[in-house]
Image (cartoon, grey):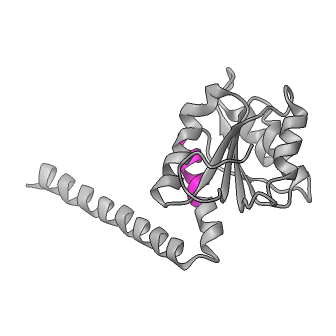
Amino acid sequence: MGNSKNGESSPLVGILMGSDSDLPVMGEAAKMLKKFGVPFELEISSAHRSPERTRQYATTAIERGLKAVIVGAGGAAHLAGVIAAETTLPVIAVPLSATSLGGLDALLSSVQMPKGIPVATMAIGAAGAVNAAIFACEIIAGSDANLAGKLLEYRKELARGVAEKSEKAKREFEG
């Protein structure tokens, strides 16, 4: 547990999910962390099916050098809360659509943590996974000027993209 799989230095962010069926969505978080050059680790562990593995992951996260943990889970989405209960690191939940409720169950479970055990909660699905990675980068950027610069440039890219789309729309419909 805990080896960086992306060929970089020691992981700063953990990406944890309850099942390999969560990989297509949680892989979006990995892609964003790679974009920003933030080393990460990726693990599968279940709050219900492998509670000891989950506890070990959480209780050793700080000593492994992690600065934040992104947790994807569907249904009752207990995984983020279990991790948050076992570490003082920031935990960022990504609710996943795993039941007939389309992820609403996971969203509500994730945002309803008891007082004193916070879990930041993103949107359901891929958008949430991307935002969780960006949020983890923002946490780390507080003490990493290089990463802070990358985040500023990313925001500028987003703004340029909006301006380009606006100009294209104007040309298509006004011109």
Residue 42 % position (x, y): 65, 42
Which quarter of the figure is the C terminus placed in?
A: bottom left
Asked which quadrant contains residue 11, the reply is bottom right
- Could you tell me which residue is drawn at 73 percent across and 32 percent down? 18
Residue 33 % position (x, y): 53, 54
- Could you tell me which residue is drawn at 52 percent across and 43 percent down? 28
Q: In screen coordinates, is 163 left or right of 123?
A: left
| Location of residue 112 with respect to 125 vertically, above or below | below
Q: Which residues are magenta?
A: 126-134
User: Residue 129 colored magenta?
Assistant: yes
User: Residue 88 colored magenta?
Assistant: no
- Could you tell me which residue is drawn at 83 percent across and 57 percent down? 118
Q: Is residue 113 visible?
A: no
Residue 70 % position (x, y): 68, 49
Of helix, strand and loop, which mostly describes the magenta segment?
helix
| Location of residue 15 with respect to 148 vertically, above or below | above
Asked which quadrant contains residue 16, the reply is top right
Residue 173 % position (x, y): 15, 50
Q: In screen coordinates, is 25 left or right of 75?
A: left
Which quarter of the figure is the N terminus placed in?
A: top right
Asked which quadrant contains residue 107, the reply is top right
Q: Is residue 64 visible?
A: yes
Report the front residue among 55 and 171. 55
- Could you tell me which residue is drawn at 58 percent across and 45 percent down? 5
| Location of residue 120 with respect to 94 vertically, above or below | below
Report the front residue among 126 and 145. 145
Report the front residue among 174 and 56. 56
Q: In screen coordinates, is 106 left or right of 126?
A: right
Residue located farthest toward the top when viewing the structure as drawn: 100
